[in-house]
Image (cartoon, rainbow, N blue to C red):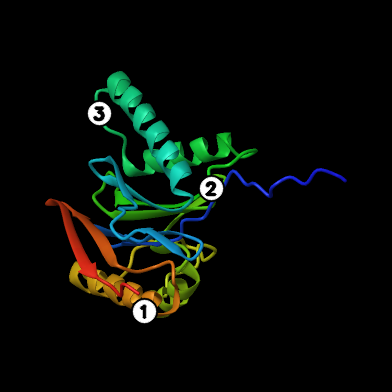
Amino acid sequence: MPKEHANWSPYDNNGGTCVAIAGSDYCVIAADTRMSTGYSILTREYSKICKLADKSFMASSGFQADVKALQKVLSSRHLIYQHQHNKQMSCPAMAQLLSNTLYYKRFFPYYAFNVLGGLDSEGKGCVFTYDAVGSYERVGYSAQGSGATLITPFLDNQLKSPSPLLLPAKDAVTPLSETEAVDLVKTCFASATERDIYTGDSVEIIILNANGVRRETEQLRRD
């Protein structure tokens, strides 16, 4: 009789949804707080948003063990950068560092789907969206994770971002005010929670602007 091996995988998908919207002078980054595996909820209060620098926040869905490892690497490399340059990384520089870090592991990737949001050197909102191996793009808004397929068409309909192929290039920022963007994010998550079992419990929202960082939470369905 041939010996049968268990179908083991080094990866898991812990679900969850992340959304980011860039405005002319603000950035909104949001993620739900449910962490699951299969049909089990592991915790209802898990933050998927990580502060990388004063003006850079990363929201990540996927395999949360890989996300933690990725956050640790980015944190240590940012610390080295601060010692060498006596300043923090800008958000676009952090976006390039994240891309390089993911690409370096492309043959055994971090199973993490990231959205990076913050303010650039001019104070404009910026959002960068990634795949698992470091391909990235600066966009006006983005959604990643288990609810992304539900939220992205809704954001496309509401925000109608200009195509990056159009010339002359247009700013990838949304026309909404900060309050409207926060309300839109809450609507996105309330809608996705109805249809996606891996999104729910509550949504954590980070708002960056010239005055600093503000944090809000909103309750979602818990079933």
Type of amino acid under label 2? Tyr
Circle 3/circle 1 CB separation < 8 Å: no
Q: Secondary structure at mark 2?
A: loop
* Mark 2 nearby-residue class (10 Å; few <14, some 14–19, many ≥20): many
Say if 156 sits above or below 78 in the image. Answer: below
Pair 3/1: label in front: 1
The first of marks 2 and 1 along the sequence is: 2
Q: Is residue 162 left or right of residue 104?
A: left
**Which residue is outermost to the front?**
1
Between 86 and 62, the one lying in front of the other is: 62
**Which residue is outermost to the left?**
211
Whether residue 176 can be seen here: no
Say if 28 sits above or below 158 in the image. Answer: above
* Mark 1 nearby-residue class (10 Å; few <14, some 14–19, many ≥20): some
The residue tagged 1 is 191
Q: Is residue 51 left or right of residue 149?
A: left
Find the distance from the CA under tag 2 to the CA under tag 1.
Answer: 26 Å
Type of amino acid under label 3? Lys
Residue at 46%, 56% in the rendered image: 14
Residue 87's mark? 3
The first of marks 2 and 3 along the sequence is: 3
Q: Is residue 222 left or right of residue 157?
A: left
